Amino acid sequence: MSKADDLFVAMCEDILANGTTTEGEKVRPHWADGTPAHTIKRFGVTNRYDLREEFPALTLRRTALKSAMDEILWIYQRKSNRVADLKSHIWDEWTDEAGTIGKAYGYQIGRVAHYPEGDFDQMDKVLYDLASTPFSRRIMTSTYTFADLAEMELYPCAYGVTYNVTQERDATTGEDGPLVLNMILNQRSQDVLTANNWNVAQYAILLMMVAQASDMVAGELLHVIADAHIYDRHVPIVRELIARERHPAPKVTLNPEVGDFYAFTTDDLIVEDYVTGPQVRDIPVAI
């Protein structure tokens, strides 16, 4: 059965059983009818996924993997903040008059800085460092720029990525194995029902793309969530979801002929044997 299902169910059960509530507190999010959107939350949730074992997709319900990939390409490849450049409509609620989400996400990844080696934006610097100094402990991106927060339509939720390379040695032969690319995803806040597996799948795909473009093996994804929460109106949906039958994880790979990070498209994502429960419809979204 999918290990992502097991982690998701355990996380939700822990939040529901041991979480604290924001009921009665002043909160920013609200429902479409104007009612405050309160949550049950857990602080400091961490989940670890090893992509060498399986791809971390939920089978309790289907995650739209190609749409998830399209958003990650929008941020890290196209480096865009224009909502029209994104195929889905998930950012429509946070679009400004210019059709953007302000100085958020892709805008930050595309900002150029000067280094002794040359001028790089954040993603280009990651690719350069992985090629030139793969064991560096400084290979990171961040979209949480304090000076620009006031000009963002929504503060970044998944804001920080750290890349770290490991290499194992064969105990019998003493030969070095392939370079393994690992990732930490830091997230300040997460709506567990609507976004958890969406974000996990997105950054697993990003890890796979960067690893392939760097001639490495995609290894572990460590997901660190400061505030993992279930909204009050989501509780019965979550209880029904985590009681469902679980299935084996799908096989998810990339087109092996693509070696340039900037050449990947959603057509290069290959998803096989993805068996899931029915999609959950009409989930209310706090805004």
Image (cartoon, helix red, strand yellow):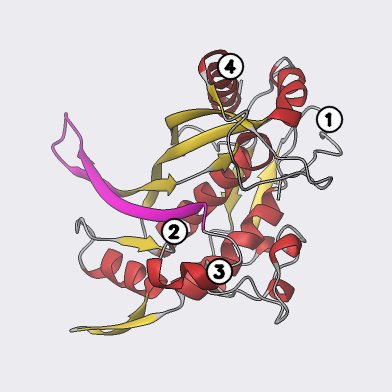
Which mark sits nearer the N-terminus, 3 or 4? Answer: 4
The magenta span reads 156-179
Q: Is residue 187 above or below residue 99?
A: above
User: Residue 155 appears at what percent x and percent y?
Assistant: 53, 59
Give left or right: position of 105 versus 62.
Answer: left
- Mark 2 — residue? 212
Which mark sits nearer the N-terminus, 1 or 2? Answer: 2
Classify 10 Å Cα crowding around label 4: few (below 14), some (14-19), many (20 and above): some
The disc at residue 13 is 4
Question: Depth check: 170 or 122 in front?
Answer: 122
Of circles 1 and 4, the one toward us is 4
Q: CA distance from mark 2 to mark 4?
A: 35 Å
Of circles 2 and 4, the one toward us is 4
Q: Residue at x 73, y 79 (%)?
A: 97
Which mark sits nearer the N-terminus, 2 or 3? Answer: 3
- Mark 3 — residue? 152
Question: Depth check: 80 or 48 in front?
Answer: 80
Q: Amino acid at mark 4?
A: Glu
Q: Taking the image as drawn, is residue 95 in sight?
A: yes
Q: Amino acid at mark 2?
A: Gln
User: Residue 39 appears at what percent x and percent y?
Assistant: 62, 31
Of circles 2 and 3, the one toward us is 3
Element carrying mark 3:
loop
Give left or right: position of 170 versus 251.
Answer: left
Q: CA distance from mark 1 to mark 3?
A: 35 Å
Q: CA distance from mark 1 to mark 2?
A: 32 Å
Classify 10 Å Cα crowding around label 1: few (below 14), some (14-19), many (20 and above): few
Where, by quadrant of the figure, is residue 100 drawn?
Answer: bottom right
- Mark 1 — residue? 278
Check whether the beta carbons of the residues at disc 3 and disc 4 lie within 8 A of each other.
Answer: no
